[in-house]
Image (cartoon, grey):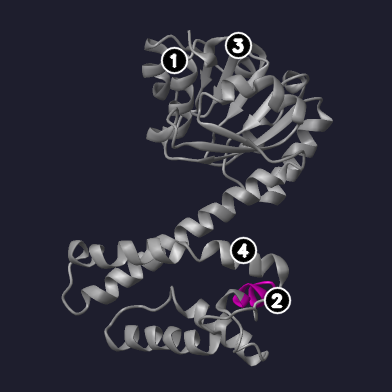
Amino acid sequence: MSEHELEPKAISIIGLGAMGTALASILIDTGNTVTVWNRTSARAEALLARGARRAATVAEALATSDVVNLCLYAAVDATLAGHGAAITGKTIVNLTNGRPDEVRALSTALGSQGARYLDGGIMATPPMIGTPHAFILYSGSADAFEDAKEQLAAFGQSHYLGEDPVLAAVSDLALLSAMYGLFGGYLHATALAGSVGFTAKEFLPLVEPWLAAMMTALPDYAERIDSGDHARDVMSNLQMQSVAISNIVAASHSLGIDPAFMEPIERLAKKRLAAGFGSDEASGIIEAMRGK
């Protein structure tokens, strides 16, 4: 028996998209009694064949288990509406991507109904669930996390961030922002290179090591950001880098590539320059993002 099978529990999963199905599957694999509900009931069939139990209604899913995992594309409030009595005394683990204002409102509402709320940010794709590459961010009730952590560990590495319920949601969105920025930069770069004949496969050996090398600058940027000192030991000042940024935008226009990805960076760089920080490191662009 694995470490995640020491204390099997009755757990409900509400929402069986690709991610909800992956979560339910790993909970079944680790010996838990899993009850599932989905608006389209046919999505539960494969899990039922593997031993899951079907809940006919949301109320039944809530009543069956003390720990209820939500994995919905949206409409969390609508799904739980009218089920206040069934929510009392439950641990609700919300693994739905959402905004911090939505999370705080939901946490408050469920708390007023006597539930313990734990918000989660899944940093993985469905096939990664249950592998060492998956990690999940959690925030909210410390007691709820402590009681459920063995089962939650089955999904991937668990990172409990604190009792403020919005910590996981903001961190989730922040990490996704970094990812989309990386992907967006890669796509724009590949489009730009492609305009003069490079295929994506031909360009990849150039861009991949370049991005890997640039990632090594992040610890230095983090120190500058935390200290607020972007003028210390500058190696590549914003004045110089802003020229390159503007050249990227201009070249994109001339080569028929939409520069929409780069234009916000150009705007922020110019804002920082106008404030008199051209001799600072480009890390100072964060101050323009913060409205300073």
Query: In which quadrant will I find the C terminus?
Result: bottom right
Label 2 and label 4: CA atoms lie apart by: 19 Å
Label 3 and label 2: CA atoms lie apart by: 48 Å
Is residue 43 rendered to the left or right of residue 292? left
Which of the pair 115/231 is nearer the observer? 231
Q: Which residue appears farthest toward the front when viewing the image? A: 233
Is residue 20 rendered to the left or right of residue 121? left
Count residues near mark 2 (Cα–Cα under 10 Å), then give few for <14, some for 14-19, many for 20+. Answer: few
Magenta-tinted stretch? 284-291
- Counting residues from the start of the chain, the first of labels 3 and 4 encountered is 3
Question: Secondary structure beneath disc 2?
Answer: loop
What residue did someone put label 4 on?
222
- Counting residues from the start of the chain, the first of labels 3 and 1 encountered is 3
Question: Secondary structure beneath disc 1?
Answer: helix
What residue did someone put label 1 on?
29
- Counting residues from the start of the chain, the first of labels 2 and 4 encountered is 4
What residue did someone put label 2 on?
291
